[in-house]
Image (spheres, coloured by chain):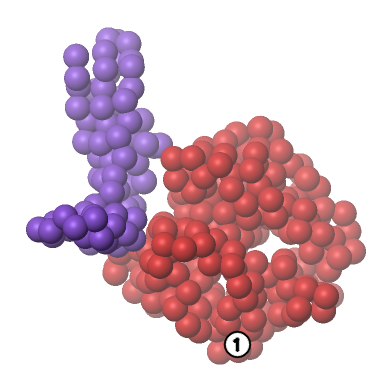
Chain colours: A red, B purple
Amino acid sequence: MAFRSAVVTFPGSNCDRDLAVALEKISGTECIRVWHGDAELPDNLDFIGLPGGFSYGDYLRCGAIASRSPVMQAVIEAANRGVPVFGVCNGFQVLTESGLLPGALLRNSGIRFVCREVSLKVENAQSLFTSGYESGQHIRIPVAHHDGNYHADEETLDRLEGEGRVAFRYAEDVNGSARQIAGVLNAAGNVLGMMPHPERAIESTHGGTDGRALFESAIRGLVGA
Amino acid sequence: MKVRVHVSLKPGVLDPQGRAIHHSLEGLGFSGVNDVRAGRLFELDVEESVSDEALDDMCRKLLANMVIENYRIEKVA
């Protein structure tokens, strides 16, 4: 069965092409591009990607306006039906603003935009998105964000940790995130949001390929090897 | 009807922007400032027919992120 993925473009998205290319190169099938104003998604999707960027110019709050756009109602419905949804950077912000993931992303504690490669620790290697990694493995993935400081109340953080929903943790303090959380899963495990950009680390010319396993895991998990 | 919606970070939520503003005030020589918290003010011009419940709904659904922010609605005139 062919892998069928879609990437949503909001006005101001700028990593939509990167995410679509990563999915296409690793799956070998075309990634369908969806516009924010579309009220419906293509049928029978295996995977929905929400890209990085600055949707709606980060007006109001990062991801706030995008999370209320027509296409997001369809994405929320699909996620609730179990369709895998993967949000990177601004896509993660859209997922928290839409309520598909808990918490919120605040301004980096150091105020500055952070754009560099960071070391991540894989906390949960059992999920659809992370089964290609080893638990505790350290990987190198680029980050590029101004508002990546993950915040949730202590009770929520304890619950996330207890349920194995912290997918990735920064190996160092990058942006002030609570418990250095870099990526979280929803309760059902079909929604992952993360600030780092695995789609920017899929071939050696990128300077690293540690992001490949994330896409390989998901594609293998969904349509088999 | 003019309505002001004041949105502020909940107590305990880190405010790097407020901290930077505080630091800058100190740099300008203002002393005695204990803390600064940055917020947001929305000025809405709405029909008289818009209910309090609808205003509340606007705040909860869009103007404020209830995970990190509180809001206060002030009717101006």
* Side of A124 where B42 appears, left or right: left
Label 1 is found on which chain of the structure?
Answer: A
Percent across and percent down for residue A20 are 78, 56
Q: Secondary structure at mark 1?
A: strand
- Is B31 or A71 nearer to us in this picture? B31
At 64% from the left and 43% from the top, the residue drawn is A12
The quarter of the picture where residue A71 lies is top right
Q: Residue at x 56, y 89 (%)?
A: A136
Q: Residue furthest right?
A: A28
Quarter of the image that includes the C terminus of chain A: bottom right
* Location of residue A153 with respect to B38 vertically, above or below: below
Question: What residue did someone put label 1 on?
Answer: A138
Query: Outermost residue, front direction?
Result: B29
Q: x and y percent of residue A50 in the render?
A: 64, 53
| Along the viewing direction, whichever of A60 and A110 lies nearer the viewer | A110
Query: For the point 88% across and 59% down, which residue is it?
Result: A29
Instruction: Judge by depth and name the residue closer to the eye, A38 or A88.
Output: A88
Residue A36 seen anywhere in this rendered image of the structure: yes
